[in-house]
Amino acid sequence: MLKRAVLVSMAIVLPLGASVAGPVGTANAAFDPNFGFDFWVDSEMGPIKSRVFRAADGNTNRVVYALDGMRARDDLNGWEIETNVARALTAWNINVVMPVGGQSSFYLDWNAPSNFFGIDGASSTGSAGSSAVGSSAAGDNVAGKRNTYKWETFLTQHLPRELNNRLGFRSTRNGVFGLSMGGSAALALAGYYPQQFSFAGSYSGFLNTSAPGMREALRVAMISAGGFNIDSMAPPWGPQWLRMDPFVFAPQLRDNNTRLWIASGSAVPGGGDVNSALGIVQAVPLEALALANTRAFQVRMDSIGARNVHYDYPPTGVHNWRNWEDQVNRMLPDLSANIG
């Protein structure tokens, strides 16, 4: 039944050419340069910016990473552009780190720079910063095309080391959460780096990426979101591809006893979810696909006796920032109790 739901959802999504991880909805927050600050760290990809927001009480022990979606921009993280979660988190005395960039990366270490048969797959006139639904081709001068994405290394080595050295931030028992692409990435980071991450949250995540048809669905999404080639990320059905699938590494999440918050909307629009017919057509099937993936992951975790997960399925909600911001607020007490 779950596989059928996945395939039906993809049949709706793929003709649209919409990104499987492209957030739908309007901004409900304004960038405030006086609140967070830029934090640059060198990496194999070049200098990478994060935005840091300090806990209200000034502590350095409680830290959470907020991961973006597939259309991550190169100027600001979507969580800062579209939501007010940084203020909510810092009021709970949690330091917030928002990495910037990584469009279509899944926050992984890729095999090679993204190209199609040796040719860059995007027009140099495309905007890497576009968050609109539809194609947003990134030029060949961006990270991931001019060089190889190394996001996993950055998030688990370079960034925490510099946060510790320069700000005194604790680099163990951190939290991490993300939406869509960032949701599966958050679970992967927690699964493979349990000392660093004691808590992980996934909202509308694609948590069964090895299910039939999912690789091709993600292929279409990554072409739409920046013109990136999934084959440059990981070969099909090899160890590297399976390593990124939460459904596959679920036993590690159980054995680590990582506290997890797993959420997906029902794909039924609620009040204020969408403001156009196009938004409904795109946001509903995307969330239906995420819901099928998330339910499959829950079945998998239940089958192996995992008891370290909270599942949250609101009666309404589609693929948009309004619902992801609501999930952060719902998750806050659980996050606060399981980090630091």
Image: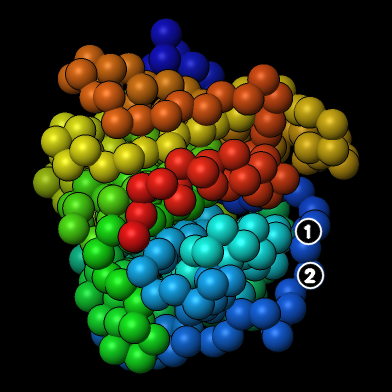
Three-letter code, disc 2? Ala
User: What kind of element bears circle 1?
Assistant: loop
Q: Circle 1: is it few (<14), some (14-19), or many (20+) Cα within 10 Å?
A: some
Q: Quadrant of the N terminus?
A: top left
State whether residue 246 appears in this view.
Answer: yes
Q: Please state which of residues 123 and 105 is positioned toward the viewer in this rendering.
A: 105
Residue 68 lies, in percent from the top left, at 52, 60
Q: Which residue is mark 2?
A: 30
Q: Quadrant of the C terminus?
A: bottom left
What mark, if any, has residue 27 been given in the picture?
1
State whether residue 11 appears in this view.
Answer: no
Q: Are marks 2 and 1 in contact (CB under 8 Å)?
A: yes
Residue 133 lies, in percent from the top left, at 69, 53
Residue 229 lies, in percent from the top left, at 38, 60
Q: Please state which of residues 23 and 155 is positioned toward the viewer in this rendering.
A: 155
Q: Please state which of residues 174 and 77 is positioned toward the viewer in this rendering.
A: 174
Q: Residue furthest front?
A: 57
Three-letter code, disc 1? Ala
User: What kind of element bears circle 2?
Assistant: loop
